[in-house]
Image (tube, grey):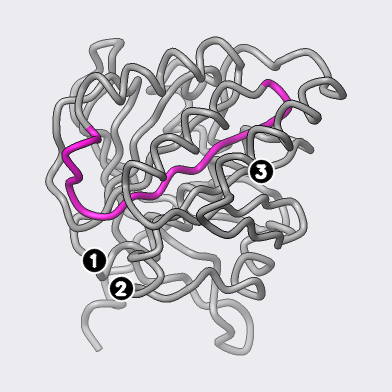
Amino acid sequence: MRTRPDPFALADLRRHLAEAALRSAPAMIGQVSFGASALDEALGGGIARAALHEVYAPATADLAAATGFAVGLALRAADQRPILWVRQDVVDAETGRLHPPGLTELGLDPARILLVRARDAQGVLRAGAEAARCPALGAVLIEPWGAPRHLDLTASRRLALAAEGSGATTLLLRAAVAPQPSAASTRWQVSSLPSRALEANAPGDPAFSVRLLRHRGGLSEREWRVEWSRDRQSFQEHAFQEHAFQE
């Protein structure tokens, strides 16, 4: 996993993206399917590829689940293209650094990630906007902390327009904040569920409670239970187990 340290992150990022754009294949269009039939059917096939989407953790303790869900979406969207992740330094201080073995367990090779760190939310948004304009990227993950004043409706519109122009699926990962007005195509709230045990009581695939809070197409709020299959690189329906809560 490559890291471009602040304060040179933005200049390095621009140069890297400009070079990558010259080598890139045509931007992908259409939708990103989840792989879970109930979810895909409800959404008409999935989420828009060239768009901004928000993933919320309702509590800091749910950030790991929200991150896992966002990584799954990024993998589905990116296919074999690179994934760029912009992260505010305070996220590391509050929740810990990204753990390469953990990413590998989700099916994401850390070598595919271009990781950009920024000291503040303004730097995160600037780098995120630069990345979202690049057609060479398969997905962009933008992770500020809290409710920075720079992340307003105008800033989200800027990100949405950049994603629409490049075709790069852009995911805004939020924690320690309530949902705010945004130009995102969809907004998701994600929390963890108990995994189904595998043979010999081995840990199962990561499981999530996923609630659609907002959809620009007018879909009403609803909830699904899904799990992420590393081997299939796909979400699938999660068989909810009542006894998991009765131990």
| Label 1 SS | helix
The magenta-colored residue range is 135-151
Label 3 crowd (10 A; few <14 / some 14-19 / many >=20): some
The image's mark for residue 94 is: 2
* Type of amino acid under label 3: Asp
Looking at the rendering, which quadrant does residue 145 occupy?
bottom left
Q: Give the image location of residue 65, x and y in percent.
A: 38, 61
Q: Could you tell me what secondary structure mostly forms the magenta stretch?
A: loop
Residue ID at (53%, 47%): 236
From mark 3 to mark 2, how far is it between C-alphas? 26 Å
If the image is split into quadrants, where does the C terminus sit?
bottom left
Residue 136 counted in the magenta span: yes
If the image is split into quadrants, where does the N terminus sit?
bottom right
Left or right position of 185 against 171: left
Give yes or no for contact between labels 2 and 1 (Cβ–Cβ under 8 Å).
Answer: yes
Camera-side residue of 198 and 28: 28
Mark 3 highlights which residue? 12
Mark 1 highlights which residue? 60
Residue ID at (52%, 56%): 6
Residue ID at (21%, 33%): 213
* Type of amino acid under label 1: Thr
